[in-house]
Structures are given as structure tokens and as C-alpha cells.
Image (cartoon, helix red, strand yellow):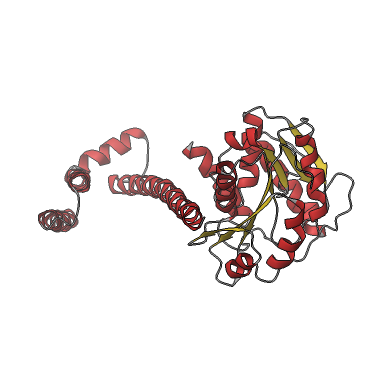
Amino acid sequence: MEKNFNKIVIVIPAYNEEKNIEKVINEVKPLVDELVIVDDGSNDRTFELAEKQGVTVLRHLINRGQGAALQTGDEYALNNQADIVVHFDADGQFLPREIKEIILPIQNGEADAVFGSRFLGKKSEIPRFKKIIIYPLAGLINKILINVSLTDPQNGFRALSRKALEKITIENDGMAHCSEILYKVFKNKLIIKEVPITVIYHDFGQGLFKGRGRGTGGFRIIKDLLLAKLMN
Amino acid sequence: MIQQIVALIIILFFISRLFWQRKNKKISGNEFIFWLVFWILAALLIISLKKIDSFVAALGFSGKGIDFLFYLSVVVLFYLVFTLGLKIEKIERDITKIVRKISLNDKEDKN
């Protein structure tokens, strides 16, 4: 990685990822200036394994959800002079080599927030049920609740400039943070770009009712979005 | 008539419990006042059931006053559950803030 004025920090939330965490760290670490793992109250050895790799590891005492973990990583990055923060997944569903593609628009000054999309050209093998039912439904709900349309609003691979990070505080602890970030990016009139990325599906991920950890599952996400609307 | 008396006795029992809890400092002043007003209101409604009957009839409902109270209580319950949900959500967010602060502080202490 060439060192210019851009300090690139990657934030990876991890909840019970002892199987994947070392591999992800080894692949991602050489590509960025600092790698921050946020262990979200795992019950397994995620924290110990990550610490051994010599990266920055933050630990939530109890499980608070992916949104909460991302916000913790973001705050750490802001306090440590990050210029660009990339959100990435610990379960190996994204390709580390695509990190440079997702940060490029920010480095070139073309965007403040870059979102990965699995529907823009690159080939991802998406389970049929998700492709036909869940994603269109999620897109529709995003459109109704937060009036945002993007080709892939539920994608967790994104890059945010320091300017964007300073304006966005993730308040949704669970998976509803995807919609929340989009909403806040639009609300703050930040410049957005979508970049094609690849997604590798290992298992189904979250269903309509329940995923892994706090604040997951389709209906729970909708409930969280509505609640957040009422609270703010 | 007998039902009304039974209901009033039950309410009296709860009010006496309330004073007892207040005396032993098990509930705060605000809570005490909220529940006191709640039970007194309930007692008043039961005493004036006849009036409610005619009031409900005047509104054009076919049911009796007691039915009306029942509907009302469901509405109040829904409202309480709703505010409770919001309160819990706020507490959850506060918990997250504490957990986050601890994790960031721990990291600073290590460096």
C-alpha cells in the first residue's frame, strides 16, 4: 500500500468467528494501514485469535449487534486519525482484493461514501430465494421508510471518508444499520458512489425471523427501523 | 351492585398495598402518585357505572358501561406496552454506549 495522506482503517465486526477470523486478518492486514477487529462479545476464541495476529482488537463485554460494533470501530478510527474507513465482514463473504476498488473513489475525491453492490456486473452466486424475494422486499422497505434507492441497500461492504464518518453516528445496534447509514448519507448530502463487488455465500445468513447475534432477522430489522423513526 | 362492592374492596386492597410500599420506600414518589391516581380513577369509574352506561348509550354503543371500561383498559394497556418498548429501546442504546466506552477505554489503557 502506498503511503500518502490517506490513512486507511478497516473495521471488521466479529461475533463468534473463530473459524474465519485468522484467515480474514491475514488476507486483509497487508492491504490497509490499520485493521480493527471489534469482537462483539463472542463466546468462542475470536478475541484471543485476533489478538495473536497483532492487529487492533476492541472487545464488547456483551453482544450488542453488528451496527453497535461498527460504530465502536468507527469511533476508534476517528480518534486515531483515519482518513478512510472500510466496513468489511469477518465471515469471508467479501474479497479483500476488492478493498482497493471500494476506496478508490474516495481517494480520487469523487465520493464521500462508497457502497459495494452485488448487482452491478460482477458475478455473485445469490441464493434464489434471496434474489427473488428478500432483496426486492428489502429494497422496497428502504424506499418506503427512508426514501433511498440503491441497487444493493443491504450490502455490508462500504467505505466512508472522514468527512462522512464525522457526520454519521450509527444508532441502530442490529442489522438495521445498513439502512440507517444510507439514510444518514443521503440526509447529509454526501456524495455517493456504488461499486460492483463479489459476494460469496457460505450459508444463508439471516432469515426473516432470526440470524446470528443481536438485532438480526428481516422482521426485526423492520421493527428496529420503525422504532428508530419514532425515537428520533 | 355486589360486583361493584367487590371491585371497590379489591381496589382498596391495592391502595393499601400502595401506601405500605411507599412507607417502606419500595417505590418512588412519582410512581406512588401515578398508581394512586390510577386506582382512584378506577374506583370513581366503578362508582359511576350507571352514568357511564347512559354515556355509552348516548354515544350510540350497544354495550354496557363495563364493556366500555374494558375497551378503554385495552387501549391504555396498549399505550403502556408501547411506551415500555420505547423505554427499553432507550436503555438498550445506553447499554451499548457503556459497552462501547469500556471497549475503547480498555484499548487506550493497553497502549
A109 or B64: which is nearer to us?
A: A109
Q: How many marks?
A: 0
Q: Quadrant of residue A66?
A: bottom right
Would you say A58 lies left or right of A158 here? left
Residue at position x 80%, y 46% in the image: A100
Q: Position of residue A57 (x, y in %)?
A: 58, 59
Q: Position of residue A58 (x, y in %)?
A: 55, 57
Residue A204 seen in this snapshot? no
Place of residue A69 in the rendered image (x, y in percent of width and height, measured from the top left):
57, 53
The answer to whether A172 is drawn above or below residue A207 in the figure is: above
Q: Nearer the viewer, residue A163 or A128?
A: A163
Question: As displayed, is residue B62 above or below residue B27?
Answer: above
Left or right of A35 on screen, residue A167: left
Whether residue B110 can be seen here:
yes
Q: Nearer the viewer, residue A29 or B3?
A: A29
Percent across and percent down for residue A110 are 78, 30
Q: Is residue B99 above or below residue A117?
A: below
Farthest top residue in view? A189
Q: Residue at x 31, y 38 (%)?
A: B56
Q: Residue at x 65, y 70 (%)?
A: A18
Q: Which quadrant would residue A112 be assigned to in this image?
A: top right
